[in-house]
Image: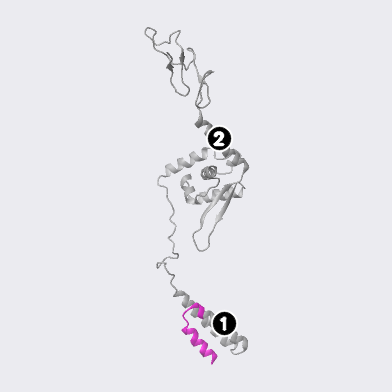
């Protein structure tokens, strides 16, 4: 009697929750001796077949037919100009992104990736760019960018903080440089660029004078190779013997002082 009732209930079940409840009832009856081993085994096989049929009929909500996920498949990015990407990563790699002793561990493409990370770290204290943005700026593919970050993390140069969120889209990873040697290299590079932007290089004797960048005014003698010529009538373009000549710092051309 019990076997026939449970068999009919299994055939009429429509959800997986009902199947789980029926399965518990079958094995509870088997434990109490209401159902024998052969009957319990037969009901278990029937439960398995019915559960498989229910699962095949389940259609995920919002997912079009023929697709395995609600999200669109990732498309592999292709560089619009491969020659420009190659030149960009070579330029970044040759710009000295890290000390030579550390840079010898990485390839040209990997050094370009680490240069992007170093620039973001120097500007913001952390690199929060997504892997696609890092790869695009470095002129490499995302696989190479990921490999470069893994290698640098394995060498103890950086830390990668993952920001996963259950049930919603994850945030980008945070990459921080922890190598003292690399940090000093980045600070020196920034100070060097500031000095290059702040002043110019002059050749000649420095004399008293004001300069917007702290340099003294520069005055050249008439025999100095950088001294400009002051054209005077009848001198053939040579400076006059009593003509003081000077230039302004950073002007690039001499100007007669009359």
Q: Position of residue 180 (x, y in %)?
A: 62, 42
Closer to the camera in the image, 238 or 124 = 124
Q: Nearer the viewer, residue 67 or 257?
A: 257
Image point 54% across, 84% down: which residue? Answer: 43
43 and 223: which one is in front? Answer: 223
Q: Image height check: is 29 above or below 82? A: below
Disc number for residue 191: 2
Q: Quadrant of residue 57?
A: bottom left
Toward the front, the furthest residue is: 210
Q: Residue furthest bottom?
A: 1
When the figure is inspected, residue 236 is found, relative to residue 172, above or below; the finding is above
* Residue at the outermost left position: 233
Q: Is residue 15 above or below residue 147?
A: below
Quote the CA–CA distance across marks 1 and 2. 73 Å
Q: Earlier in the sequence, mark 1 or mark 2?
A: 1
Q: Main secondary structure of the magenta part?
A: helix
> In the structure shown, which secondary structural element does the residue marked by tag 2 occupy?
helix
Q: Which mark is residue 221?
A: none
Q: Which residue is mark 1?
A: 24
Q: Is residue 40 left or right of residue 63?
A: right
Quadrant of residue 98 in the image? top right
Residue 42 percent location from the top left of the image: 54, 85
Residue at 53%, 53% in the rendered image: 173
The stretch in magenta equals 1-18
Look at the image and say whether residue 10 sits in the magenta stretch.
Answer: yes
C-beta proximity under 8 Å, tags 1 and 2: no
- Say which element carries label 1: helix
Quadrant of the snapshot with the C terminus: top left
């Amino acid at each position: 009697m019990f076997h026939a009732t449970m068999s009919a209930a299994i055939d009429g079940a429509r959800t997986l929750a009902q199947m789980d409840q029926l399965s518990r009832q079958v094995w509870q009856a088997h434990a109490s001796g209401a159902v024998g081993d052969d009957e319990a085994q037969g009901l278990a096989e029937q439960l398995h077949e019915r559960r498989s049929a229910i699962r095949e009929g389940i259609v995920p909500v919002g997912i079009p037919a023929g697709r395995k996920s609600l999200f669109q498949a990732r498309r592999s990015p292709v560089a619009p100009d491969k020659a420009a990407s190659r030149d960009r990563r070579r330029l970044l790699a040759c710009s000295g992104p890290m000390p030579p002793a550390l840079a010898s561990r990485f390839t040209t493409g990997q050094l370009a990736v680490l240069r992007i990370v170093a620039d973001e770290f120097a500007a913001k204290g952390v690199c929060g760019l997504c892997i696609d943005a890092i790869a695009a700026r470095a002129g490499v593919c995302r696989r190479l960018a990921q490999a470069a970050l893994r290698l640098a993390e394995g060498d103890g140069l950086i830390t990668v903080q993952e920001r996963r969120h259950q049930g919603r889209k994850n945030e980008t990873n945070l990459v921080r440089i922890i190598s003292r040697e690399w940090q000093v290299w980045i600070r020196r590079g920034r100070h060097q660029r500031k000095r290059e932007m702040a002043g110019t290089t002059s050749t000649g004797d420095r004399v008293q004078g004001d300069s917007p960048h702290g340099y003294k005014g520069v005055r050249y003698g008439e025999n100095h190779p950088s001294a400009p010529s002051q054209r005077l009538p009848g001198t053939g373009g040579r400076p006059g013997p009593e003509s003081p000549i000077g230039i302004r710092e950073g002007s690039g051309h001499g100007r007669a002082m009359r």
